[in-house]
Amino acid sequence: EAQVTQNPRYLITVTGKKLTVTCSQNMNHEYMSWYRQDPGLGLRQIYYSMNVEVTDKGDVPEGYKVSRKEKRNFPLILESPSPNQTSLYFCASSERGPQDEQYFGPGTRLTVT
Amino acid sequence: GNSVTQMEGPVTLSEEAFLTINCTYTATGYPSLFWYVQYPGEGLQLLLKATKADDKGSNKGFEATYRKETTSFHLEKGSVQVSDSAVYFCALNTGNQFYFGTGTSLTVIP
């Protein structure tokens, strides 16, 4: 089954404790992206990747890192999480770029205390 | 800069009512426009898209026309069903980036 998976689905952590949210797709898609969803703000793009070893900042990259060492994986890293990063995070992938249909993962709800 | 503005919700309609959700955009260049839908507890799914001016996207009875002169991409459906209850996001793509509106929650009551 074609899908985008994220782990964990729920995470509660404390300020400053490094964490990684994994994202994996099995569709051989070139484009992958991370978004955060906050009430009243919709979804905002954090980082995106056009292909392996090619990543770039979206609208709200501060406090986040990503890597794309393999085509299928695109982890999101929070080196020193802060409470303002409490949010619902979605990973998405598409065949070539954002002009194509993006397939979204189920979301990761992160709480930073 | 690039941005999407869509009508505030929530919107509550009776089954078989006509739906319009307004969406306007600001963009550099020639963006592609999208409507994504999010059902409760799920990720987003593409509903429809249009890639150039005057294009009409359609799917599942929903339609939206890319109007460059009014920078709009309003979503319409002639007769909503209870199963259409969801949050609808208007979005645009320019270059390699993607921008979403804030979302409009729709509840359809029997």
Image: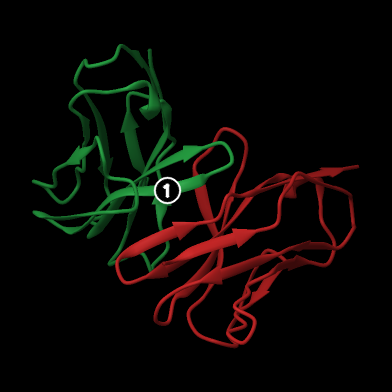
Chain colours: A green, B red
Q: Chain of mark 1?
A: A
**Observer-nearest of A79 and B79:** A79
Look at the picture and state if A67 lies above or below B47.
Answer: above
Q: Is residue A109 left or right of residue B24?
A: left
Residue under the point 28% across and 15% down: A15
Per the image, label 1 sits on a secondary structure element best described as strand
Look at the picture and state if B91 lies above or below B49.
Answer: above
Q: Disc 1 residue type? A: Arg
**Observer-nearest of B7 and A97:** B7
Q: Quadrant of residue A86?
A: top left
User: To which residue does mark 1 refer?
Assistant: A44
Location of residue A53 in the rendering, given as x and y in whole percent from the top left corner: 8, 54
Residue under the point 80% across and 45% down: B82
Q: Is residue B63 left or right of residue B48?
A: right
Q: Quadrant of residue A18?
A: top left
Q: Quadrant of residue A1?
A: top left
**Observer-nearest of B50 and B100:** B100
Look at the picture and state if B51 lies above or below A113.
Answer: below
Location of residue A73 in the rendering, given as x and y in whole percent from the top left corner: 19, 43
